[in-house]
Image (tube, rainbow, N blue to C red):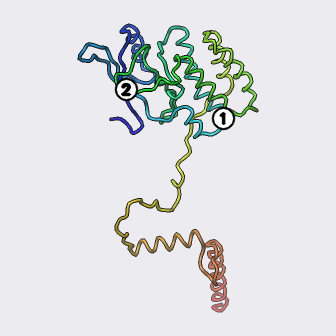
Amino acid sequence: MLQDDERTTWWAAASEGDLFGWVATRCAPPDRHLGPVRAVGRTGTGTLVVELLRPAGPSITAALDRLGTPSVGVAVTLTTPLLDLAVAASRGAVVLGCARLDDVVVDDSGAVVLCDRPPGAVPLVVGSSADAGLVEGVTALLLAVRIVCERVDPREPCRPLIDAAIVDARSGDPDALERLRATVRTAGAPRPVRWDPPAGVFSFDEVGSSAPGPEPTVTAVDAVITRVRSVVERGVPLGGRRVPVRQVGVGVVVAVGVVVSAVTALGG
């Protein structure tokens, strides 16, 4: 069962050898930072096709808009897996296809995922995916890394070092990519990506329904709860104004103490 934000696409292979190498990268063992393959098969005409799953979650740029200015630790968390993939691809250990910047997503767990397409593949359904901004996999990874690092506060001491390393790594040289990864790793300890809770989650206000419905039935218990909540939040009505519950409580304790003292004195 797919989640609301997940979707699948079918791609037809231009070269079966390239497709099998690309699929093998995602199978033994599966990498959580690569978009998973759901199925591989053939059409009625014998064309080899693959079904890909795009995990639920915003693109890297949308995720950063939601996060605001990431800390160095969050930037390390987001970029290190991308650089691991880039280094592995440049060394020939991983086969990547092509992708756009928006094909780097942040899933619900806060992990970055590259949703690239198989090398040379074409969509099985014409028009199912735009080619605008399509670049090689390593280039897409470096673009995502640059986008993340540029959001970090420029006053951080690590920024100049990382910026210079990104410029050097644009050539795709494996050694330059290794140096960039080492620079990012030493910038700070990784920190988890935390999403802010939606507004109103901890509010007492009821969320109104857009569709009209029957008037709610107010029970005696509901009335008592509403009254108590009003007293706790706004205070006790007294003399045309509201007195905080804490002050009323102190006053009651003092009054009881005075009465007890008087009774004790009279009884003595």
Q: Is residue 157 left or right of residue 136?
A: right
87 in relation to 52, above or below: above
Q: Amino acid at mark 2?
A: Thr
Q: Residue furthest bottom?
A: 266
* Residue for badge 1: 71
Residue found 49% across the figure and 35% down from its top: 109
Q: Position of residue 115 (x, y in %)?
A: 46, 24
Secondary structure under tag 2 reads strand
Dot label at residue 266: none
- Report the front residue among 87 and 139: 139
Are discs 1 and 2 less than 8 Å apart at CB?
no
Secondary structure under tag 1 reads loop
Query: What separation in Å lies between label 1 and label 2 (alpha carbons)?
Result: 34 Å
Circle 1 packing at 10 Å, graded few (<14), some (14-19), many (20+), is some
Q: Quadrant of residue 80?
A: top right
Circle 2 packing at 10 Å, graded few (<14), some (14-19), many (20+), is some
Q: Amino acid at mark 1?
A: Ser
* Residue for badge 2: 9
Q: Quadrant of residue 141?
A: top right
Q: Position of residue 14 (x, y in %)?
A: 38, 11
- Report the front residue among 36 and 146: 146
Camera-nearest label, 1 or 2: 2
110 in relation to 94, above or below: below
Q: Is residue 100 left or right of residue 268?
A: left
Question: Where the C terminus falls, by quadrant?
Answer: bottom right
- Report the front residue among 129 and 7: 129
Q: Position of residue 257 (x, y in %)?
A: 65, 81
